[in-house]
Image (cartoon, rainbow, N blue to C red):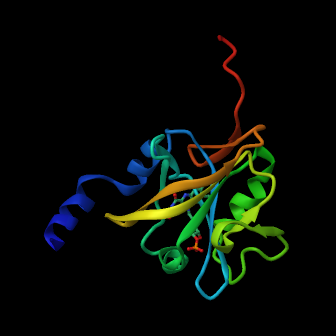
Amino acid sequence: MAEKRAQHAARFDGRELRRALGQYATGVTVVTARAPDGRSVGMTANSFTSVSMDPPLVLWCPGKNSPSLPDFTDASHFAVHVLAADQHHLSRQFATPADDKFRGTPTTPGIAGTPLLDGAVARFQCRTVQRLDAGDHIIFLGEVEQYDADGGAPLVFHSGYYHVATKHPDL
Ligand SMILES: Cc1cc2nc3c(=O)[nH]c(=O)nc-3n(C[C@H](O)[C@H](O)[C@H](O)COP(=O)(O)O)c2cc1C
């Protein structure tokens, strides 16, 4: 097993692979949960993906080394906030390890007390239905129990930089 891992590590240059994967433009989300002791946890994630319409399933992938992972694992629910273009500060805030990432950020309680942030272009409140081991990450599969979508300009992440989306000029 250790040998196999070493082979994988040697096959690609990690920085180059990351750069290639970064060519895939994504939105940016902040995923939140309420830990069993009542603390709010949250992290920035662009691994969010819609999976199924019936039943309504989505996924996202926290890293195994993320300090917040045990709290997400212990929580029954998570909420995905698709960030608006003007919420780049929240992306940075929730991508920076801190004791209380929510300081100065108002929230309202959602399903199972999951902290909800304002101003997102869409929010999905989900019950975790499956967790899959996936290399150095865990895939969290959630069933959407509630959602709202105010719409507006989304925040875009591409090649390591934040962007805004504009309609294609040719179309
Ligand atoms: C745009 C962006 C997208 C990110 N996407 C992910 C992701 O999908 N999964 C992940 O584990 N970390 C991702 N990160 C990094 C985490 O947000 C960061 O490691 C954070 O500190 C994790 O939270 P924690 O320290 O509270 O565990 C992303 C960071 C940025 C800026």
Q: Residue at x 75, y 46 (%)?
A: 84
Q: Quarter holding the C terminus? A: top right
> Does 158 sit above or below residue 68?
above
Q: In the image, is 116 to the left or to the right of 141?
A: right
Question: Can you name the residue that lies furthest to the top here?
Answer: 170
Residue 142: x %, y % from top left: 48, 58
Q: Residue at x 29, y 52 (%)?
A: 12
Residue 31: x %, y % from top left: 61, 62
Q: In the image, is 68 to the left or to the right of 114?
A: left
Q: In the image, is 133 to the left or to the right of 102?
A: left
> Does 126 sit above or below residue 75?
above
Q: Tell how many labels.
A: 0
Of the pair 164 and 11, the residue shown nearer to us = 164
Hey, which quadrant is residue 132 in on the image?
bottom left
Q: Quadrant of ligand 1?
A: bottom right
Residue 137: x %, y % from top left: 40, 65
Q: Residue at x 50, y 39 (%)?
A: 24
